[in-house]
Image (tube, rainbow, N blue to C red):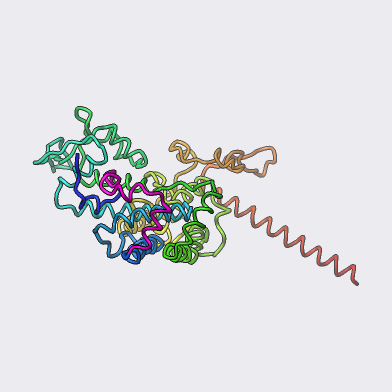
Amino acid sequence: MSISNELVNRYPWLPSLKKIYEDIGEKPPAEFISELFINSDSIQIAERVLKIFEAAFNNLEEIPDNKIDDLNIHVYLLLKIILYALNNKMITNRTANLYSKNAYNDMERESNESNLYNICQDLGLKINFYDPPEPYGLKVVKDHREKLKANFSIHYIDYLRLASNLRDEYRKLTNNTLINGYVFIQNKTLIRLIQEYVRNKLLIEETGDKASLKAFIKEVSKIQGFKELYDKISSLWDKRKEEFDFSFKIDIKSKEDMLSLYPPCVIEILKKAEEGQNLVHHERLFIVWFLLALEYPVEKVVDIFSTLPDFDKEKTTYQVEYAKRKNYTPYQCSTLKSLGLCMADKYKDELCKEGYGSKDPTERKKLKHPLAYIRIKKYRSEKEEEYKKNLAKRALEESKNQND
C-alpha cells in the first residue's frame, strides 16, 4: 500500500521512509552527515537533535517544541547515527525511551483512526479496522456492565511479536479476547505496542569493534557541524552521568554506600532499570517495597523508574506513595524463587547459596529474606571495619614501642 509523505514526515521510523526518501534513507552514514552539514537547514536539525538528548538526560517525558515537517526525517537519521557514535547503552536506552514516548503521544493525539490503520499497514501488521467499532465482549465491575468495543483486531502472531518485551500479566494472550486468530485491541494498547516497535528501532547495540567506531568518529569529526553537536552531547552527558551512576547506591539516611550490601535480586532489577529495560509487574512491586522498607524517600524510588519505556511520573508517584502508606513487606526468598526473580545462581552469591553461620559452628542457616541479606552483610562489614581499625591500632602501638 502507498502511504502519504506527511505521515512519514510525522513518523520517520516507518518502513516507507526508505521508499519515499530513498535519496537520503539509503546513504552511508558518513556521506549523509557530509551532505547534511553543508545544507542551510543543518543548524536547525542539529538544534532539534540536541533538544532530544537534553530532554532524555533530564528525564522529560516528551520532546519540547517538537515539530512535524520534512526536517523530521533528517533529525531521525542523524539521531540514530549519533547513538551509534556515542556507543553508550545508558544513553541509547534513555533516548529510545523518550523518542518512543513522544511517538506514543503523537499517535494518541491522532484524531483519525485511519492514520493509525495506515501506520499498522506500513509496519506489515495483519490488522482489521472496524468503523463503527466492533463489539467483542463484556466487562463486569460489581453491578456495572459495559460492552467492550474496539476499532482494531491484530493477528495473534503480530501481537505476540510486538508485546514480547512487555511482560505484564494483562498483556498475556490468555487475558485478551482472541477470535479467529485475531486479538481485539483498544487504541491505546495498540499504540503502546507500536511504541515498543519505535523504541527497538533506536536500540543500537554497543559495538565491540572499537577500531571501526574510532575510525568512523575520526572521519565524521572532520565535519565541523557534526563535531560541535557530538561534543555538546558528550559534554552534557559528562555533567549528568555521575547522577545516574550513583542515584541508587546511596542510602539517604546514613549516606552509606549500600550497593555492596544489596542482594543479587535487587542489583539485577536496579541494573535493568538503569539500562532502561522494561520491568515486569512483580519486579516493580518488589523493588518499591524493598527500598521503602529501607526508608528511601518516595521521590528517590520514583526516580528509579524514570528510565523505563512506560514511565509516567504522576502515576508512579501515586503508586509509590500508596505502597508507602500500606507498608507492604518485600517478597521473601521463596517467593522470589517462585517468580523467577532470585539471582543467586546468576551472580554466584555465596550468602544466598550457602547461607550463614549460627551459634552452633556445625550449623548453617538458610537465607529467607532479602532484608536479612542486608543485615548480615552490614554486620560482616562492620566487623571487618572494626578488625581493620584494631589491626591499624596495634601496628601503630608496635611502631611507637620500637621507636621508644
Residue positioned 37% across, 58% down in the render: 35
Query: Foreground residue, 301 or 211?
Result: 211
| Residue at the limit of the structure toward the top, as seen here | 180
Which quarter of the picture shows residue 305?
bottom left
In the image, is residue 163 above or below residue 34?
A: above
**Can you give x and y, in whole percent of width and height, for residue 257 in the image?**
57, 60
Direction bottom: furthest residue: 404
What is the x, y in percent for residue 313? 33, 59
Left or right: 314, with 262 as reference point:
left
- Judged left or right of residue 113, residue 15 is right
In front of the other: 204 or 315: 204
- Percent x, y for residue 170? 29, 40
* Residue at position x 46%, y 41% in the image: 341
Which residues are the magenta region? 14-39
Q: Is residue 334 left or right of residue 142?
A: right
- Camera sees residue 290: no
- Residue 23 lies within the magenta run: yes
| Residue 44 magenta-highlighted | no
Picture layout, residue 152 above or below residue 400: above
